[in-house]
Protein backbone atom coordinates (compact mmCIF):
# COMPACT_ATOMS: atom_id res chain seq x y z
CA UNK A 1 0.00 0.00 0.00
CA UNK A 2 1.81 3.08 -1.28
CA UNK A 3 -0.62 5.42 0.43
CA UNK A 4 0.31 3.98 3.82
CA UNK A 5 3.96 5.00 3.37
CA UNK A 6 3.01 8.38 1.98
CA UNK A 7 0.81 9.08 5.00
CA UNK A 8 3.64 7.94 7.24
CA UNK A 9 5.91 10.38 5.42
CA UNK A 10 3.47 13.22 6.07
CA UNK A 11 3.34 12.49 9.80
CA UNK A 12 7.16 12.35 9.96
CA UNK A 13 7.30 15.64 8.10
CA UNK A 14 4.85 17.24 10.55
CA UNK A 15 6.78 15.88 13.55
CA UNK A 16 10.08 17.23 12.25
CA UNK A 17 8.60 20.68 11.85
CA UNK A 18 9.55 22.69 14.93
CA UNK A 19 6.36 24.80 14.84
CA UNK A 20 3.44 22.62 13.70
CA UNK A 21 3.22 20.14 16.63
CA UNK A 22 3.20 23.02 19.14
CA UNK A 23 0.60 24.85 17.09
CA UNK A 24 -1.64 21.78 16.87
CA UNK A 25 -1.58 21.39 20.68
CA UNK A 26 -1.83 25.06 21.65
CA UNK A 27 -4.48 25.91 19.09
CA UNK A 28 -7.46 24.09 20.68
CA UNK A 29 -6.35 25.06 24.18
CA UNK A 30 -6.27 28.77 23.33
CA UNK A 31 -9.43 28.42 21.26
CA UNK A 32 -11.40 27.05 24.21
CA UNK A 33 -9.78 29.06 27.02
CA UNK A 34 -9.83 32.50 25.41
CA UNK A 35 -12.27 32.74 22.50
CA UNK A 36 -15.56 31.95 24.34
CA UNK A 37 -14.85 34.90 26.64
CA UNK A 38 -13.77 37.27 23.87
CA UNK A 39 -16.29 36.39 21.13
CA UNK A 40 -19.21 37.65 23.18
CA UNK A 41 -21.85 39.98 21.76
CA UNK A 42 -23.23 40.89 25.19
CA UNK A 43 -22.78 44.57 26.06
CA UNK A 44 -21.76 45.27 29.68
CA UNK A 45 -20.05 47.95 31.76
CA UNK A 46 -21.76 50.83 29.96
CA UNK A 47 -20.72 54.07 31.65
CA UNK A 48 -23.64 56.36 32.55
CA UNK A 49 -23.68 60.03 33.49
CA UNK A 50 -26.78 61.15 35.43
CA UNK A 51 -28.32 64.61 35.58
CA UNK A 52 -30.84 64.63 38.43
CA UNK A 53 -33.04 67.71 38.09
CA UNK A 54 -35.66 66.33 40.49
CA UNK A 55 -33.53 65.32 43.50
CA UNK A 56 -36.40 63.26 44.90
CA UNK A 57 -36.52 59.88 46.63
CA UNK A 58 -37.78 58.20 43.46
CA UNK A 59 -34.98 59.79 41.44
CA UNK A 60 -32.36 58.47 43.87
CA UNK A 61 -33.94 55.01 43.72
CA UNK A 62 -33.65 55.11 39.93
CA UNK A 63 -29.97 56.09 40.14
CA UNK A 64 -29.32 53.27 42.64
CA UNK A 65 -31.04 50.80 40.30
CA UNK A 66 -28.72 51.86 37.47
CA UNK A 67 -25.65 51.61 39.70
CA UNK A 68 -26.70 48.14 40.91
CA UNK A 69 -27.23 46.78 37.39
CA UNK A 70 -24.58 44.45 36.00
CA UNK A 71 -24.79 46.23 32.65
CA UNK A 72 -23.97 49.75 33.84
CA UNK A 73 -21.23 51.64 35.63
CA UNK A 74 -22.31 54.94 37.19
CA UNK A 75 -19.63 57.31 35.94
CA UNK A 76 -20.71 60.60 37.55
CA UNK A 77 -23.64 62.84 38.47
CA UNK A 78 -23.46 66.11 36.59
CA UNK A 79 -25.30 69.38 37.20
CA UNK A 80 -25.81 70.34 33.56
CA UNK A 81 -26.20 68.63 30.21
CA UNK A 82 -23.13 70.51 28.95
CA UNK A 83 -20.90 68.89 31.58
CA UNK A 84 -22.30 65.45 30.78
CA UNK A 85 -21.86 65.81 27.00
CA UNK A 86 -18.24 66.82 27.65
CA UNK A 87 -17.77 63.42 29.35
CA UNK A 88 -19.21 61.69 26.25
CA UNK A 89 -16.89 63.67 23.97
CA UNK A 90 -13.91 62.60 26.07
CA UNK A 91 -15.18 58.95 25.95
CA UNK A 92 -15.59 58.91 29.73
CA UNK A 93 -19.33 58.22 29.44
CA UNK A 94 -21.48 56.25 26.97
CA UNK A 95 -25.00 57.36 27.96
CA UNK A 96 -26.47 60.41 29.65
CA UNK A 97 -29.66 59.93 31.72
CA UNK A 98 -31.45 63.22 32.26
CA UNK A 99 -34.12 63.01 35.02
CA UNK A 100 -36.60 65.90 34.59
CA UNK A 101 -38.02 68.14 37.32
CA UNK A 102 -41.18 66.89 39.12
CA UNK A 103 -40.34 63.32 38.10
CA UNK A 104 -41.62 61.80 41.36
CA UNK A 105 -44.73 63.99 41.47
CA UNK A 106 -45.71 63.09 37.90
CA UNK A 107 -45.19 59.37 38.49
CA UNK A 108 -47.43 59.42 41.58
CA UNK A 109 -50.11 61.31 39.66
CA UNK A 110 -50.03 58.69 36.93
CA UNK A 111 -48.49 61.04 34.41
CA UNK A 112 -45.65 59.54 32.40
CA UNK A 113 -42.61 61.84 32.74
CA UNK A 114 -40.07 61.87 29.91
CA UNK A 115 -36.54 60.87 30.82
CA UNK A 116 -34.00 61.84 28.16
CA UNK A 117 -31.39 59.19 27.30
CA UNK A 118 -28.55 60.45 25.13
CA UNK A 119 -26.28 57.67 23.87
CA UNK A 120 -22.95 57.76 22.10
CA UNK A 121 -23.91 55.97 18.87
CA UNK A 122 -20.42 55.85 17.36
CA UNK A 123 -20.70 52.18 18.33
CA UNK A 124 -24.33 51.50 17.32
CA UNK A 125 -24.51 48.13 19.10
CA UNK A 126 -23.36 49.58 22.39
CA UNK A 127 -25.51 52.68 22.02
CA UNK A 128 -28.65 50.81 20.96
CA UNK A 129 -28.45 48.00 23.49
CA UNK A 130 -27.43 50.39 26.27
CA UNK A 131 -30.51 52.57 25.77
CA UNK A 132 -32.73 49.47 25.62
CA UNK A 133 -31.33 48.16 28.91
CA UNK A 134 -31.69 51.58 30.53
CA UNK A 135 -35.27 51.95 29.27
CA UNK A 136 -36.13 48.66 31.02
CA UNK A 137 -34.57 49.88 34.28
CA UNK A 138 -36.61 53.11 34.11
CA UNK A 139 -39.82 51.20 33.34
CA UNK A 140 -39.27 48.84 36.28
CA UNK A 141 -38.62 51.79 38.57
CA UNK A 142 -41.92 53.43 37.60
CA UNK A 143 -43.88 50.19 37.93
CA UNK A 144 -42.58 49.45 41.43
CA UNK A 145 -43.52 52.94 42.55
CA UNK A 146 -46.97 53.37 41.09
CA UNK A 147 -48.86 50.15 41.66
CA UNK A 148 -47.79 46.58 42.06
CA UNK A 149 -48.44 45.25 38.60
CA UNK A 150 -47.37 42.09 36.88
CA UNK A 151 -46.16 42.17 33.33
CA UNK A 152 -48.64 40.73 30.78
CA UNK A 153 -45.69 39.18 28.92
CA UNK A 154 -43.79 36.13 30.12
CA UNK A 155 -40.58 35.09 28.37
CA UNK A 156 -39.59 31.44 28.05
CA UNK A 157 -36.09 30.75 26.75
CA UNK A 158 -35.79 27.45 24.90
CA UNK A 159 -32.61 25.35 24.46
CA UNK A 160 -30.41 27.96 26.25
CA UNK A 161 -32.33 28.92 29.38
CA UNK A 162 -29.64 31.11 30.90
CA UNK A 163 -28.89 32.93 27.62
CA UNK A 164 -25.29 31.78 27.89
CA UNK A 165 -23.45 33.15 24.88
CA UNK A 166 -20.75 30.50 25.17
CA UNK A 167 -23.30 27.82 24.31
CA UNK A 168 -23.94 29.68 21.06
CA UNK A 169 -20.29 30.33 20.17
CA UNK A 170 -18.43 27.15 21.15
CA UNK A 171 -19.88 24.87 18.42
CA UNK A 172 -19.27 27.56 15.80
CA UNK A 173 -15.62 27.83 16.83
CA UNK A 174 -15.20 24.28 15.53
CA UNK A 175 -15.77 25.62 12.02
CA UNK A 176 -12.81 28.02 12.36
CA UNK A 177 -10.71 25.19 13.73
CA UNK A 178 -11.48 22.92 10.77
CA UNK A 179 -10.97 25.74 8.32
CA UNK A 180 -7.43 26.41 9.52
CA UNK A 181 -6.31 22.81 9.97
CA UNK A 182 -7.94 21.19 6.93
CA UNK A 183 -7.86 24.18 4.58
CA UNK A 184 -4.77 26.20 5.37
CA UNK A 185 -2.23 23.55 6.37
CA UNK A 186 -2.55 21.19 3.34
CA UNK A 187 -2.51 24.14 0.93
CA UNK A 188 0.61 25.65 2.51
CA UNK A 189 2.21 22.22 2.69
CA UNK A 190 1.91 21.62 -1.07
CA UNK A 191 2.96 25.13 -2.07
CA UNK A 192 6.00 25.01 0.22
CA UNK A 193 6.97 21.67 -1.36
CA UNK A 194 6.68 23.33 -4.75
CA UNK A 195 9.03 26.10 -3.66
CA UNK A 196 11.55 23.70 -2.13
CA UNK A 197 11.30 21.35 -5.09
CA UNK A 198 10.57 18.13 -3.19
CA UNK A 199 7.23 17.71 -4.93
CA UNK A 200 9.09 17.08 -8.20
CA UNK A 201 10.50 13.89 -6.71
CA UNK A 202 6.98 12.61 -6.02
CA UNK A 203 5.86 13.65 -9.50
CA UNK A 204 8.64 11.55 -11.00
CA UNK A 205 7.25 8.39 -9.34
CA UNK A 206 4.30 6.31 -10.65
CA UNK A 207 2.12 7.42 -7.67
CA UNK A 208 -1.32 8.35 -8.98
CA UNK A 209 -2.84 11.78 -8.43
CA UNK A 210 -5.63 10.38 -6.23
CA UNK A 211 -3.14 8.53 -4.01
CA UNK A 212 -0.92 11.57 -3.69
CA UNK A 213 -3.79 13.95 -2.88
CA UNK A 214 -5.37 11.63 -0.29
CA UNK A 215 -2.00 11.03 1.34
CA UNK A 216 -1.73 14.79 1.78
CA UNK A 217 -5.24 15.17 3.22
CA UNK A 218 -5.79 12.16 5.48
CA UNK A 219 -3.22 13.22 8.15
CA UNK A 220 -4.90 16.61 8.53
CA UNK A 221 -8.37 15.05 8.73
CA UNK A 222 -7.17 12.82 11.57
CA UNK A 223 -5.51 15.75 13.33
CA UNK A 224 -8.68 17.84 12.98
CA UNK A 225 -10.84 15.09 14.53
CA UNK A 226 -8.41 14.72 17.46
CA UNK A 227 -8.25 18.48 18.00
CA UNK A 228 -12.02 18.78 17.78
CA UNK A 229 -12.45 16.04 20.38
CA UNK A 230 -10.02 17.86 22.65
CA UNK A 231 -12.09 21.05 22.25
CA UNK A 232 -15.28 19.24 23.27
CA UNK A 233 -13.55 17.84 26.35
CA UNK A 234 -12.20 21.28 27.28
CA UNK A 235 -15.64 22.87 26.79
CA UNK A 236 -17.12 20.30 29.16
CA UNK A 237 -14.37 20.70 31.78
CA UNK A 238 -14.09 24.50 31.66
CA UNK A 239 -17.69 25.57 31.07
CA UNK A 240 -19.82 22.50 31.75
CA UNK A 241 -21.13 22.67 28.16
CA UNK A 242 -21.74 19.40 26.34
CA UNK A 243 -23.46 18.26 23.16
CA UNK A 244 -27.26 17.82 23.46
CA UNK A 245 -27.52 15.66 20.36
CA UNK A 246 -25.55 12.84 18.77
CA UNK A 247 -21.78 13.26 18.63
CA UNK A 248 -21.69 11.01 15.56
CA UNK A 249 -23.73 13.60 13.65
CA UNK A 250 -21.31 16.30 14.79
CA UNK A 251 -18.33 14.28 13.52
CA UNK A 252 -20.09 13.47 10.24
CA UNK A 253 -20.79 17.15 9.75
CA UNK A 254 -17.17 17.99 10.60
CA UNK A 255 -15.86 15.36 8.19
CA UNK A 256 -17.90 16.78 5.32
CA UNK A 257 -16.69 20.30 6.08
CA UNK A 258 -13.10 19.01 6.25
CA UNK A 259 -13.52 17.52 2.78
CA UNK A 260 -14.81 20.86 1.49
CA UNK A 261 -11.96 22.91 2.98
CA UNK A 262 -9.32 20.38 1.99
CA UNK A 263 -10.53 20.48 -1.60
CA UNK A 264 -10.61 24.28 -1.57
CA UNK A 265 -7.10 24.49 -0.12
CA UNK A 266 -5.74 22.09 -2.73
CA UNK A 267 -7.38 23.98 -5.57
CA UNK A 268 -5.73 27.19 -4.38
CA UNK A 269 -2.36 25.46 -3.97
CA UNK A 270 -2.61 23.95 -7.46
CA UNK A 271 -3.10 27.38 -9.01
CA UNK A 272 -0.50 29.15 -6.81
CA UNK A 273 3.20 29.27 -7.61
CA UNK A 274 4.37 30.89 -4.37
CA UNK A 275 3.51 30.73 -0.70
CA UNK A 276 2.50 34.39 -0.68
CA UNK A 277 -0.10 33.83 -3.39
CA UNK A 278 -1.63 30.87 -1.57
CA UNK A 279 -1.74 32.66 1.80
CA UNK A 280 -3.28 35.80 0.34
CA UNK A 281 -6.01 34.01 -1.61
CA UNK A 282 -6.76 31.61 1.23
CA UNK A 283 -6.96 34.40 3.80
CA UNK A 284 -9.33 36.40 1.58
CA UNK A 285 -11.66 33.43 1.18
CA UNK A 286 -11.45 32.54 4.88
CA UNK A 287 -12.52 36.03 5.96
CA UNK A 288 -15.42 36.05 3.48
CA UNK A 289 -16.63 32.61 4.53
CA UNK A 290 -16.45 33.35 8.27
CA UNK A 291 -18.13 36.76 8.11
CA UNK A 292 -20.87 35.55 5.73
CA UNK A 293 -21.55 32.31 7.58
CA UNK A 294 -23.79 33.59 10.37
CA UNK A 295 -21.15 32.78 12.96
CA UNK A 296 -21.31 36.25 14.54
CA UNK A 297 -24.49 37.80 13.15
CA UNK A 298 -27.75 36.22 11.95
CA UNK A 299 -27.85 35.65 8.20
CA UNK A 300 -31.39 37.07 8.02
CA UNK A 301 -30.05 40.41 9.32
CA UNK A 302 -27.77 40.74 6.28
CA UNK A 303 -28.73 42.47 3.02
CA UNK A 304 -30.47 40.25 0.47
CA UNK A 305 -27.41 40.03 -1.82
CA UNK A 306 -25.28 38.92 1.14
CA UNK A 307 -27.86 36.28 2.08
CA UNK A 308 -27.66 34.92 -1.47
CA UNK A 309 -23.87 34.53 -1.16
CA UNK A 310 -24.33 32.13 1.76
CA UNK A 311 -25.80 29.57 -0.67
CA UNK A 312 -22.28 28.65 -1.82
CA UNK A 313 -20.65 29.00 1.60
CA UNK A 314 -19.99 25.59 3.21
CA UNK A 315 -19.26 27.24 6.55
CA UNK A 316 -22.85 28.52 6.68
CA UNK A 317 -24.32 25.00 6.40
CA UNK A 318 -21.84 23.60 8.93
CA UNK A 319 -22.66 26.23 11.56
CA UNK A 320 -26.41 25.77 11.07
CA UNK A 321 -26.07 22.00 11.43
CA UNK A 322 -23.70 21.93 14.40
CA UNK A 323 -25.77 24.46 16.36
CA UNK A 324 -28.90 22.44 15.63
CA UNK A 325 -27.34 19.26 17.00
CA UNK A 326 -25.07 20.66 19.73
CA UNK A 327 -27.41 23.27 21.21
CA UNK A 328 -30.91 22.05 20.32
CA UNK A 329 -30.26 18.32 20.31
CA UNK A 330 -31.48 17.86 16.73
CA UNK A 331 -31.32 14.53 14.92
CA UNK A 332 -30.34 13.53 11.38
CA UNK A 333 -33.73 14.58 10.07
CA UNK A 334 -33.15 18.10 11.36
CA UNK A 335 -29.94 18.60 9.37
CA UNK A 336 -30.47 16.42 6.28
CA UNK A 337 -30.48 19.50 4.02
CA UNK A 338 -27.15 20.77 5.40
CA UNK A 339 -25.56 17.31 5.13
CA UNK A 340 -26.75 16.92 1.55
CA UNK A 341 -25.40 20.29 0.47
CA UNK A 342 -22.06 19.74 2.23
CA UNK A 343 -21.71 16.30 0.59
CA UNK A 344 -22.34 17.80 -2.84
CA UNK A 345 -19.89 20.64 -2.26
CA UNK A 346 -17.24 18.25 -0.93
CA UNK A 347 -17.56 16.01 -3.99
CA UNK A 348 -17.32 18.94 -6.43
CA UNK A 349 -14.36 20.60 -4.69
CA UNK A 350 -12.36 17.40 -4.20
CA UNK A 351 -12.84 16.21 -7.78
CA UNK A 352 -11.84 19.68 -8.98
CA UNK A 353 -8.77 19.58 -6.71
CA UNK A 354 -7.58 16.25 -8.07
CA UNK A 355 -8.29 17.15 -11.69
CA UNK A 356 -6.48 20.49 -11.39
CA UNK A 357 -3.34 18.89 -9.97
CA UNK A 358 -0.69 18.45 -12.66
CA UNK A 359 2.10 15.99 -12.04
CA UNK A 360 4.16 17.22 -14.98
CA UNK A 361 4.14 20.83 -16.08
Image (cartoon, helix red, strand yellow):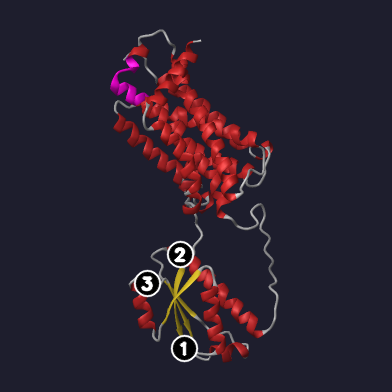
Judge whether 326 appears above or below 361 on screen: below
Q: How far is mark 2 from mark 1, CA to CA?
A: 26 Å
Judge whether 305 appears above or below 76 on screen: above
Tag 1: Cα neighbours inside 10 Å, few (<14), some, or many (≥20)?
A: some
**Number of numbered labels in the structure image:** 3
Front-most of residues 102 and 204: 204
Q: Residue at x 68, y 68 (%)?
A: 153
Res. 270 visible in picture:
no
Front-most of residues 298 and 221: 221
**Does the magenta stretch mainly form a helix, a strand or a loop?**
helix
Query: Which x, y percent locates residue 68?
Result: 54, 74
**SS at badge 3:** loop
Res. 164 visible in picture:
yes
**SS at badge 1:** loop
The tag earlier along the polypeptide, 3 or 2, is: 3
Query: Which x, y percent locates residue 6?
Result: 45, 16
Identify the residue position indicated by label 3 in the image: 92
User: Image quadrant for the C terminus?
Assistant: top left
Query: Which x, y percent locates residue 304?
Result: 49, 49
**SS at badge 2:** helix
- Identity of the residue furthest to the top in this view: 206
**Of circles 3 and 1, which is in front?**
3
Tag 2: Cα neighbours inside 10 Å, few (<14), some, or many (≥20)?
A: many
Amino acid sequence: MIIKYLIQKEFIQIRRNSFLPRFIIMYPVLMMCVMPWVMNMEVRHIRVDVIDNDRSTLGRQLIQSVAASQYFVLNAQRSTYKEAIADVERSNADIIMNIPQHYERDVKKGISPKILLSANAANPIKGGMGTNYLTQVVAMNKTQTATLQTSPVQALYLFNKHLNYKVFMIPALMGILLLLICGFLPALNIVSEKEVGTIEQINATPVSKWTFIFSKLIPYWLIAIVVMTLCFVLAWILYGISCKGSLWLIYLNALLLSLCFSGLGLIISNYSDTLQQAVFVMWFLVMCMILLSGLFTPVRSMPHWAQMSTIINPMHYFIDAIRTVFVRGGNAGSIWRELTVLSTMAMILDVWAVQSYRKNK
